[in-house]
Amino acid sequence: MTRTIPILVGLAVTAILTIVLCIFIGPAGFGIPSLGPGAADIVGGIRLPRVLAAFFVGGSLAVAGAAMQALFRNPMADPYILGTSSGGALGASLAIVFLGGFFVPVFAWIGAVLAILIVWSIAGRRGVISVETLLLTGIAVSFFFSALVSFLIAIAGQNVHQIIFWLMGGLWNVSPSDAILSACILVPAGALLFFMGRDLNALSLGEETAAHLGIDATRARWAVLGGCTILVASAVSIAGAIGFIGLITPHIVRILLGPDNRVVILASILVGGIILVISDTLARTFFSDLPVGIITAFIGAPFFIWLIYQRGDSR
Amino acid sequence: MNDRLSLDAENLHAGYCMEDIVKAVSCSFAEGTFAGIIGPNGSGKTTLLKAFSRVIPSSGILELNGKAVTGYSPAELGMALGFVPQDEGRPFSYTVLQVVLMARYARTSRFAALAPDDYTRCHVVLEETGIAHLSDRSIRTLSGGEWQRVLIARALAQDTQVLLLDEPTSHLDLSHQSDILSLMRSLAASGSTIIGVFHDLNLAAHYCDRLIMMQNGQIVADGTPALVLTHEKIREVYGADVVTSFHPATGRTFLMPLSTPPGAIAPDKTQNVLVISGGGSGTDLLHFLSRRGYYLKAGILATTDTDYLTVKALQIPCVEVLPFSEIPAHSLAEFRDLLARADRIILAVHPVGTGNLPVLLALREADPSRVILHLPEGRDFVSFDYAKGAAAAALTDLCAAGAQCTASFNGILGLLDIAPHERAQPPV
């Protein structure tokens, strides 16, 4: 398509403008001059890492969602479908309940990756794995982990608040190292998924089809799932289980640019980043730092419904 | 014809989950072949095709263009073998062109863009398959037949030596079926190796040089359509009865299913009925009477006559003669014998010329009270007369002498129920 490049460039410019603009917006006021002394600390030490982390986390979730939707041949798939969020939630809850809130990101990361590994190994027991088996196993494992999380909530006592806030997802505790870490994961994993874009196109029509078109379907599937796992686990460990970005962003992108996954992967990173940066800025500026997952779902769900009725076919 | 083998399978076993669906299949395909795989549902046709394309694991020897299939990388395989599936899910709104361009992925590095040649090739196959006008349409808006042509176009754009087709025309209308299969035949003529699974046996017989019939995962017949599509084989494998013949217009083997298998209804009527017909005038009547259990005989029929095929299919005894020749005296004598022994004689009125006039004259000598004439509605004897009036005269004469005439099958049944001697004699 001839309009692909201009739209991608437009999105990149919008992303940069959004990041810059949102760095200067916050509860302490707009712009650097109005802040007075300490402005450099607020902007450079707090807002900059938080906005960048929001961008990379949003981009990670969105690109993983796009890849998972193609891989599972299902536009309703989201990046948490293989149990990453419930695994991460279990890890985080354990850290909150038993370690007094230390090591929450590490435990969340381990929980998220562990969930996927469990799903893989259960689904892979009989040799050949179909994506349907993976999907169903993922749903089952998710429910199991959610049950454990609910159990921890029930016995958590005064820590309930902390677990629930983690589950809703937010970027309060973001440090500069988180921003760097998420960038260091998004860039290579995003590049991997971008170069798997054609494989994803073929896989989205079926694994046999991909094989007939000369794609190494098994290798491609593992590469995509591996990349998505790292992306989602990192996003979850930094910001909790932020919903809707991974589900909705690829749809918006496909409406703008069509379903070719090379384009969808690139644009999802940009659009997912933009959405989370704006949502997080709204959350911390106007809603006294509400969990951003509430904002994304609150805006995302009606928007999604509008999309469905507007397009009739938003794939 | 080239003798180089494109695909060679020996003792191939394949299936899902440890269970072999294809068992010990050995067959090979030379370049320039258009072969059809046929067989009833569940006989392993599609499984065999997918074993060929390596998406279903198999054991045994499988060579593609002289090299073991296991030695191919996925991309090499995608350049050597194309596959058209029965159908494919369409979860996303790719354009037709985007889907067809996927054929070129195997030839393109993941770090490079598709070349202008790839686009050119895809536009050519879109033209060839008659869907160039759809190239920018979303695949989700296509009809089943349009989508099937996209899948065919994509396989063609892979530019492979071997092309495997799984019921490639199941969603296509008549004209697109013949367009696509003619295209396949011309590809085979220019050296490609085309192997297709077909449910429509007539279509397979018409387009393929070779048919492979499968049953329970094994090959039960392999050869030219005429050799494979025999009445006996089809009854054995499909459990259905058909008339096999050669299509009058194309000369290819041709099948017609029979609604009533011969011998399914044993004759239970005591009456011995002789049916005289020709040129198809007796086809329906023979089926009608056979279904009602009459004990039938027929005569005199040339072996090229449509009614002759019916008689053979229904296994009705018949006096047969060579086509386009004078009726020999011994056949006429045999016929006279049948006339004398028949309880009832039905003449399904048909064109009579000097060649078959002797049949009518022999009938004229029979007892008219036993004769029933079946004259189609709105026709008269003269319209069937190609013997300068002699035929019409003989028929009129027959009626005057007491033969009954009716236009309907039920009329015939009514007349058959009344024995000739019970009937009122016609006024003299």
Image: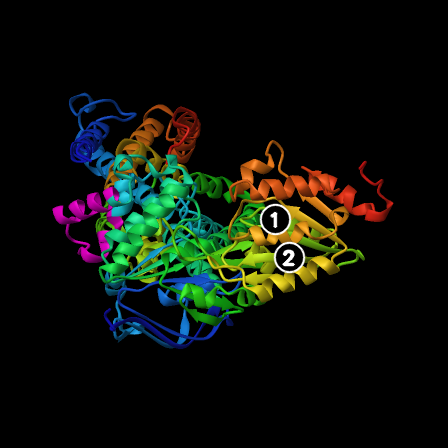
Question: Which residue is drawn at the image coordinates 66% and 52% (left, top)?
Answer: B363
Q: Quadrant of residue A8?
A: top left
Q: Are marks 2 and 1 in contact (CB under 8 Å)?
A: yes
Q: Residues within 10 Å of mark 2 (few under 14, many from 20)?
A: many
Disc 1 marks which residue? B282
Circle on res. A241: none
Outermost residue to the front: B428
Q: Is residue B406 visible?
A: yes
Q: Residue A303, percent across and down?
A: 40, 27
Q: Mark 1 falls on what kind of element?
A: loop
Q: Amino acid at mark 1?
A: Gly
The residue segment tinted magenta is B101-127
Disc 2 marks which residue? B298
Q: Quadrant of residue A171?
A: top left
Q: Closer to the N terminus: mark 2 or mark 1? A: 1
Quarter of the image that includes the C terminus of chain A: top left
Q: Amino acid at mark 2?
A: Ala
Query: In which chain is the residue bearing label 2?
Result: B
Outermost residue to the right: B422
Separation of residues labelled 2 and 1 (CA atoms): 9 Å
Q: Residues within 10 Å of mark 1 (few under 14, many from 20)?
A: many
